[in-house]
Image (cartoon, rainbow, N blue to C red):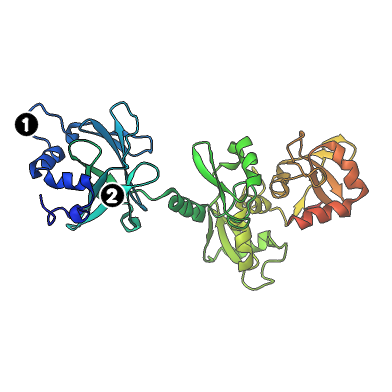
Amino acid sequence: MNATTFPLLAHPTLVVLLALASLPTTLIAQQAVPHAGNHQHAQHQTSTTGPHKGPLKAVGNLQAETLVTPAGLKVYLYDLGGQPVSVQQSRGVARLSVEGNAKRYRYDLFPSEDNALKADVDLSRVVGRQLTVDVQLVGAAPDTLAYQDVTVLSPAQSELDAVAITRQKVCVVSGKPLGSMGNPVAVQVAGQRLFVCCAGCVDALKANPEKFTQARPKVEVVKFTESDAALITKQAVCPVMDEPLGGMGQPIKLLVGGKPLFLCCKGCIKKVQSEPEKYLAMVYRDGEKGSERVRGNVVPAGTDAVRPDVFKVSDADKPFIAAQKKCPVMDEPLDAMGGPYKVNADGKAIYICCPGCAKKIAAEPQKYLAVLKSQGVDAPAIR
């Protein structure tokens, strides 16, 4: 082999590269492909997974772990016992080809700080494509190490997260748009990788994953049909603004979980997209047929008292409990102390974590309604 056929010889000062130049071409070829006889080469070995989650392949008396990512290539070496082998005096070449493209791309491999031989190269354009990587290494063993890996380049986790965040749109705990509170936080629960708007929502998700991992109703903007006039008359008000439908022009029609829901204007669409369960429950009573409506931000008065003026909640309260989330007195989750419970604050329903908070709300109802208002919560009226 000469400098023309193997460009690594552009580094003549490196003894290991001179050693590579002196090797017979047939030796490298023999290690790259199987042939007759009892000698075992790399291609006869069964690949497993290495410490860095890359394929691990026996090459001569060593093992090579090859990582191909959108940021480039890395090769880690180990002895047959799995212990890392230093590559600080080693060099290499990787030749990469993409399925469907006859061209081969050559990259020099040099030592990195984490004891790998690496080539920094942008491979993001071939994500999802099958790649064939031919690797030749010198300096780590008496002979040149040569092997081939075939892999499909997967997106980096950051790229997968960006796609997932775009699809999820909102925090599964708070309902706020992802990104509105800084970088979304990834949480692995119930076999899923979900995102929350901030670190404050992580514990709530981990404590009750079943509550937050249920599939959210799909929200679609659709065109009107001839039958919609009767449905608009029946619904009467926008569940977001509590304004008469038609008061701001032609109502907007949505399908939420396959059920029609009408809004007063386009500005209300994002609210429904962020909390579809809440607005669906406001228009359709739980457990009843879709034609039954809940008018606007209204809940029935409590009937099952746990003490004077403190009531157990019902299914009709669920969307408002989901919207309020925390007790305005204790600033604790509503279910933290056996709640939620419902109290009447000047004709509006406030949900509390325990009956003990009722006295404070009774003494200063407007104070706690203002607390909720500052948090973006509009307490429902009690009918």
User: Pointers 1 and 2 in contact (CB under 8 A)?
Assistant: no
- Dot in front, 1 or 2: 2
Residue located at (88% from left, 51% from top): 365
Q: Would you name the residue on which mark 2 appears?
A: 109
Please tell me which of labels 1 and 2 falls first in the chain: 1
The front one of 5 and 271 is 5
Would residue 35 appear left or right of 302 to someone viewing this image? left
* Amino acid type at mark 2: Leu
When the figure is inspected, residue 50 is found, relative to residue 361, above or below; the finding is above
Q: Is residue 346 visible?
A: no
* Amino acid type at mark 1: Ala
Q: Residue furthest left?
A: 36
Q: Is residue 179 visible?
A: yes
Marks 1 and 2 sit apart, C-alpha to C-alpha, by 31 Å
x and y percentages locating residue 371 in the rendered image: 81, 53
Residue located at (78% from left, 44% from top): 331
Circle number at residue 36? 1
Q: How many marks?
A: 2
Would residue 14 appear left or right of 165 to someone viewing this image? left
Residue located at (36% from left, 41% from top): 115
The front one of 69 and 307 is 69
Element type at marker 1? loop
x and y percentages locating residue 273 in the rendered image: 58, 57
Would residue 24 appear left or right of 315 to someone viewing this image? left
The front one of 251 and 124 is 124
| Label 1 packing within 10 angstroms: few (<14), some (14-19), many (20+) | few
Q: Residue furthest bottom?
A: 249
